[in-house]
Every structure is written in C-alpha cells, then in structure tokens.
Amino acid sequence: AELSSFTLKFHYNDISSLQELFDQYPNQIAGVILEPATTVGPKPSDTLIHNGKPANFLHEVKSLCHNAGAVFILDEMITGFRWALNGAQGFYDVEPDLATFGKAMANGFAVAALTGKKEIMGIGGILNEGQERVFLTSTTHGAEMGALGAFIKTVEIIKRDDVINHLWLFGKSLIDGMNAIAKEIGIENYFVAEGYGCSPNYITRNKDGNTSFELRTLFSQEVLKKGVMMPYIALCHAHSDAELNMTLDAVRSALNIYAGALNNGVDKYLQSAAIKPVFRKYN
C-alpha cells in the first residue's frame, strides 16, 4: 500500500497517457518501467525516427524519460531470451537504461538479473568512495553457483540449437492451426489465437463478444482430456511436430464442445468452477 502511493500508471501504446503524467508531476518521476511487449507489441510512432526508420512506442517512452530526467526501464522477465537472445529490446532496437531478466535465462533455475548502463549500475557498487551508496548486492545466496551454471549452459544451448527461431516457427504454426480449426467449426469470432510466434495467446469470447473465463475454463477442461494442459501457452524447444499435432487434435475436439456451449450455455458443460485471473484483488 505504501509503494502504491508512489506509483503512477499509464497505457501501453498510448504515449499521451505518459506525457500527461510527466506534465502533471514535473521533476517528480524517477523512472518508468514497463514490459516491452506482451501479446501486442509497440506500435509505430507518428513523429519519431530511429536509425532512419519510423520509431515505435518504446522509443517514444525512452525519449520522454530522457527529456524529463527519468530512468527508462524494461521488464524483460518474460520477453528476454524469447523474442531474441538479447530480448525484446534487441528485437525492437531500443536500448533501456536498466533491464530485468529471469525465467527463460536459466531454463527455470532460480536466477534473475538486473542489467543496465554503467553510470547507473555503478551507483550500487563499492568503488565510488565517499558517495552515498545504493545497496544492490546481497550474499544471502552468494555461494549458490548452480543457477549461474544453468544460465551459462542455457545460453550456450539457445545459440547452438537456434532455440528462439524454433519457438517463433512452432508458435506461428500453432496460432495458424488453432485459428484454422476455429474457422472450420464456425466460431472464429469467439475463439481467437493471437500474439507472436514466440509467445502465443488465445482469447475466449461469449456470444456477446465479451471475454469469458467460463469458456476459457471449458476449453482448458476439454484439451486436458486429450492430454494437453493449456490454461495458457508456454512454448519450449522440446516441442516438435508430434506435440503440435497432438495439441491441434486436442484443440479440434475442445472447440467442437466449445461451439455447443456457445449455443446451449456453458454451464451445461463445465465440470469445475471457472478459472479466475491470476492477478486479482480477492481470492
């Protein structure tokens, strides 16, 4: 609660919403942090040019930050080592002042990283004699080398086996296949696979066109009956054509049930309580 009073929110891909905050709180915003992309990416800028090409929303955010003396921070916990080896910042050609990484960087081992420009990271170092110190390091897990070894090996394998390209290709095939099945069944307006190949997503809508957690639960329930656990989609290098075909077979079976639920009511088909959003105020 205490931190929330020092936090402001703006809308992704709406640079005016961030500009309004800088105007409303002049010289008070220390930094801006955001994920570089989710199921959508940064839209092209109407005004900025970057390296001779139209810039994007991330470049606009960076420009606003630097004009106001704020630190530009990218949260690459999810996008890092998936969009590209150097994260979505490499994919979108934007350099943050600070960036965080985790998750895929060590293939699930408990390791994360805060990276950034020397002049900022150095503030948390021990070499600036006499300067006020920002505490960034801890020895609580300082002797734990296993996760660091996993990180080094993971990056080696990502490079050697062209893992990121595999994720993009597999994910695109999955998205295209799911949408083709939905169209074949006639429910393409109510079940939509979307996102980037490296990070697919699917949307479940009811007859009114509104997002439905009940239908999402039904879909998860039915694909699970075919051996596919997919409350969300998380790809890995081990997924091959066999897993793709198995998944699409499960999707076909599930969407046939889904179509019936659209017409007859989802409650007749559900065998459990509906899924709830992970990030919610109440259980």
Image (cartoon, grey):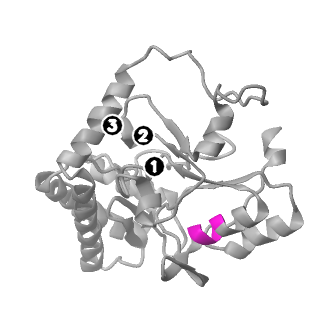
Q: Mark 3 highlights which residue?
A: 107
- Residue ID for mark 1: 78
Q: Which amino acid does label 3 sit on?
A: Asn
Mark 1 residue crowding within 10 angstroms, few (<14) / some (14–19) / many (20+)? many
Identify the residue at image location x=57%, y=56%.
Answer: 96
Q: Is the magenta stretch mostly helix, strand or loop?
A: helix
**Amino acid type assigned to the residue bearing label 2 in the image:** Lys
Tell me residue 206's x, y (percent). Answer: 49, 70
Residue type, mark 1 in image: Ile
Q: Position of residue 97 (x, y in %)?
A: 60, 52
- Is 256 on the left-hand or right-hand side of 75? left
Residue 40 drawn at (x, y percent): 48, 68
Q: Marks 3 and 1: in contact by CB < 8 Å? A: no
Left or right of 138? Residue 281 is right
Figure check: 204 above or below 32: below
Residue 60 in the magenta stretch? The answer is yes
- Please, is residue 224 above or below residue 61 in the view? above
Question: Quarter of the image containing the N terminus?
Answer: top right
Note whether residue 1 is visible. no
Q: How far apart are marks 1 and 2 (CA)?
A: 7 Å
* Magenta stretch bounds: 58-62
The quadrant of the image that shows the C terminus is top right
